Amino acid sequence: MNPVKTYDQLVKENESLLWQLEEATEIIHAIRTGQIDALVVKGKDGHELYTLKTADQTYRVFIEKMNEGAVTLNEDGIILYCNSMFATMVDLPLSKVIGMSFDKFIAENCLDVYQEIFRKGWTQDGKFELSISSHDSLIPCQLSVTTLQLDEGVSLSIIITDLSYQKEVQRLLKLNNERLEKTNFALKMSNHDLQQFASVASHDLQEPLRKILIFSGLLKSKHFNELPEESLQYLEKIIASSGRMRTMIIDILSYSGLAVNNSQFELTNLNDVVQEVLDDFELLIQDKGAKFEIDNLPEIEVNHGQIRQVFQNLIGNALKFSKVNETPVIKIKSVKTGENSGETDCYISVSDNGIGFDEKYGEKIFSLFQRLNTKDKYEGSGIGLAITKKILDKHNGSITATSKEGVGSEFVITLPLRYSSHPEIID
């Protein structure tokens, strides 16, 4: 019978075994990382020297430092060597992985692909995608295959890159693109509904409003002397409010109509456009005694009708917001053009000596229904400058405003000289 060991003996024996295990672990780590290239082992016939091959050592050092998994296979597909990263990927001890057939880690639905990769890999390098099996989960990976000359002969080296993060990013991108497509579709439907509303507004809303204006006018003209003064005041308010409503409906239709694709861009002389607008305002200009100072303006490629509306809004505002006891002076100048500056844009300034406005509202005035003055004193819908900005946006242009209360305002518009010079324009 073996003598029963005491507790102290068992403790010392356990400590000795732990020390041997730590020593063995350190030696294995040193071998794998290339810190030693030979071992002296005591055997039956004395001490024997085992030399670790130089090529193998370089290979081990290299792949142990990689963030990717790496395996070396023989001609039968058996794993001769693998690094710690691959063992971590498949969640198995390193000692268990070595000696296994690599196809044991290939997802079942990828086995045919792997067999083809393994067959071709001995004669040509390549990169392929398939899934590695790790217990109950699948890891999408890229396999980089090449042959490697080691001391024991030619082996097949496979670098395994985990694509889980990239695949997740691709999935999220696809999901976001699908959401974007749905949003774009909803936006198209919304724009369609807006056009339908514009159609309703142009017919169903304007018709009753037209009758209100007609019959209010008839009532005023035919019964002017019969109606009490208070009733006449009420009638004037009805007519004035109806007129403002008609203007607002027309302006809303103009604004919504800009959403329609209109690619009729043509070479247009801005001098002709401005003259057309001045002809339209002829009676108002005479009534106010307004004076104009106009430069020679460039010829640019634009939608004629829309740019005409831009100048109509700017000149109309300059006339509307003039001072009561001062002659309006409106200046339209070409601040800078592409022909003489080497640039592709032109800059047109429209300035006046009117009532002006506080510059802190410089951006606000281009929003829908924004008014800086009361509707009782100055007529309008508050949409004109919003329409102007939208037209310039469609031309890939811009507009800025500077002003000072009681001194006047200046609007500077920027437009490309040629439509073709801005291919990113989207209607």
Image (cartoon, helix red, strand yellow):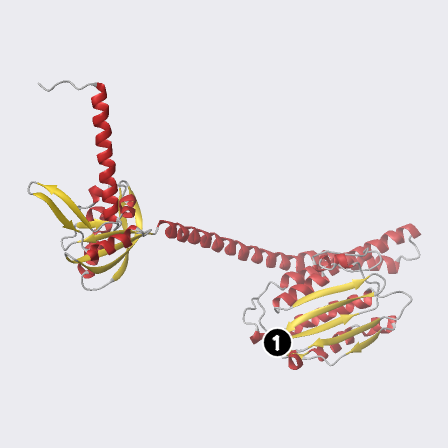
Left or right, residue 353 beside residue 258: right
Q: Which residue lies furthest to the front in this view?
A: 46
Q: What is the three-letter code of the residue carrying label 1?
A: Thr
Quadrant into which the C terminus falls? bottom right
**Relative to residue 355, is residue 154 drawn left or right?**
left
**289, above or below 177, in the image:** below
The one of 394 and 335 positioned closer to us in this rendering = 335
Provide the residue designation for mark 1. Answer: 344
Q: Which of 78 and 184 is in front in this view?
A: 78
The quarter holding residue 336 reads: bottom right
Q: Position of residue 26 (x, y in %)?
A: 25, 41
Visible residue check, residue 130 = no
Q: Establish if 309 lies above or below 170.
A: below
Q: What element carries label 1?
A: loop
Q: Position of residue 317 (x, y in %)?
A: 78, 66
**Rendering coords of residue 50 (x, y %):** 14, 49
View extreme (left): residue: 45
